[in-house]
Image (cartoon, rainbow, N blue to C red):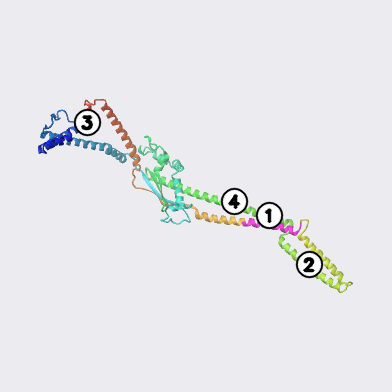
Amino acid sequence: MTNEERIRNWRQGGGSRAARQTVLADELLDDALAELPAPAERRVPREPRGEGVYRLPNDLEIQEARLAIIERRQIRLRAILRRIFVFALAPLLVVLFYVSMIATKLYQGEAIFTVQTSSQSAPSPTAGLFAIGGANSTIGDAFKAREFILSRPMMDYMEKRYGFMSHFASSEMDPLTRFGSPLGLNQDPYKYYLKRVRVAVDVQEGILRLNVQARTPEDAKRFGDAILASAEAHVNRFSDKISEDQISSLTRDVQSAEQQVAEARRSLAVVQARRGELAPEQAATAVYGLISNLELQRAEAQRERDALLNQGLTDSPLLPRLNARVEELNAQVSEQRRRLVSPGGNSLQTTLSEFENASARKQIAQARWESTLNTLQQAYLRILEQRRYFVLIVGMSVGTFPKVRDILPIAAPILLLLALIYAAFFAARRARLASGRMGGFRVPEVVRQWRR
């Protein structure tokens, strides 16, 4: 009976209480029979009714319909609870059981260190990420140390020297957290290494926190100390290499400048030995002074001679001596001038030119050597100021209580396995239901029970 028919019948009945009760009873009975198909013996036969013919259900039929609805709701609630237990609580209980009873508990050691130079002060709290830009900043050196600790060469060194990876491949580790697990888990050594060794960088303070996990506190401390020692050696080697490269380059420049100075000095000595002059500048000055003095004496002698000639004393006994004196002074002046400029190439002027060239080369080489030496000294000071130091703030310490470190990696394969089991179970159940009969029950009845 549709709603329109019920409303029409109710209006035809004048809205009486009996009519409303009849409509309500029909609705309850129809809903109960539609939702829960009852067995044949419990079904209430419906008498065919014509237009305007109604039958009031008795109290027993109404009560049975109500009980059927309540039973249906209880069955649905129990089905929901079963599904919650099967799909939520049961996997959670399995994971908790594995974590508490089977999973290997690991100890974790922690150390705090930093990398800085002697010229660096404590980093400012407001420096933040802006400190990363400096080439010699603490943050930059800290990230370099972190990358070295978390590198594959470091993993290989720890395995070769201390058996780090073999420590976690032991049968004492549970199958889900073991390295190289027989279940096919944890096969990548580098990813497993990153799970057991972690380095956190505090960009505000410029410090690093090293965390190392192991099955025993002694192993955790041993592995952590080995990593710290290797990181310190790496920082020292890196700093020494930078210093050696800078010093070796500047030292070669100083040595080259020293060789040029030595060659300039030898060239100057050759000029002095070949010309026989230790100080050609002084010799030339002396020659110019001597020429000037001789010319003064010659002028005086000529003046005296001219005075005698002007007085008509041509037969004076002083005249021959003055003529000889003038001739002698002329010869001396000519000789001294030949010393300065000589066509044969042995003049003092040529010697002075060669000496000046050799002396200039020596001065240039000397200035370059002094410059390179000064640069080398400044480089030594700068290297001492910028040398990297590995500073251990807090040594490796291990926690008192171990705990399971890989809860999510443990839960994931367990949940996946349970999902596969559920899928296989429901697939097999659906296949059995589709076969036609199951355990002597009819298919419609089994389907109804499964839907409940």
Q: Quarter of the image holding residue 353?
A: bottom right
Residue type pointed to by label 2: Glu
Q: Secondary structure at mark 3?
A: helix
**Residue denoted by label 1:** 266
Tell me: residue 231, above or below residue 416: below
C-alpha gap between disc 1 and disc 3? 117 Å
Name the front one of labels 4 and 2. Answer: 2
Mark 1 residue crowding within 10 angstroms, few (<14) / some (14–19) / many (20+) = some
- Check the picture and name the quadrant holding the C terminus: top left
Q: Earlier in the sequence, mark 3 or mark 2?
A: 2
**Mark 1 or mark 3, whichever is nearer to me:** 3
The secondary structure that dominates the magenta segment is helix
Distance, label 4 to label 1, CA atoms, is 21 Å
> Which residue position holds label 4?
252
Q: Amino acid at mark 4?
A: Arg
Q: Is residue 358 magenta?
A: yes
Q: Residue at x 34, y 41 (%)?
A: 408
In the rendered view, tell whether residue 96 sits above or below residue 140: above
Q: Which residue is mark 3?
A: 448
Residue 145 position within the rendered picture, expressed as x and y whole percent measured from the top left: 45, 48
**Given the image, on which type of amino acid does mark 1 rest?**
Arg
Taking the view exactly as shown, the residue that stands out farthest to the bottom is 311
Q: Which residues are magenta?
A: 346-367
Q: Earlier in the sequence, mark 2 or mark 1?
A: 1
Give the class, few, some or many, for how many residues have Cα within 10 Å of label 3's Cα (few <14, many ≥20).
few
Q: Position of residue 323 (x, y in %)?
A: 85, 68
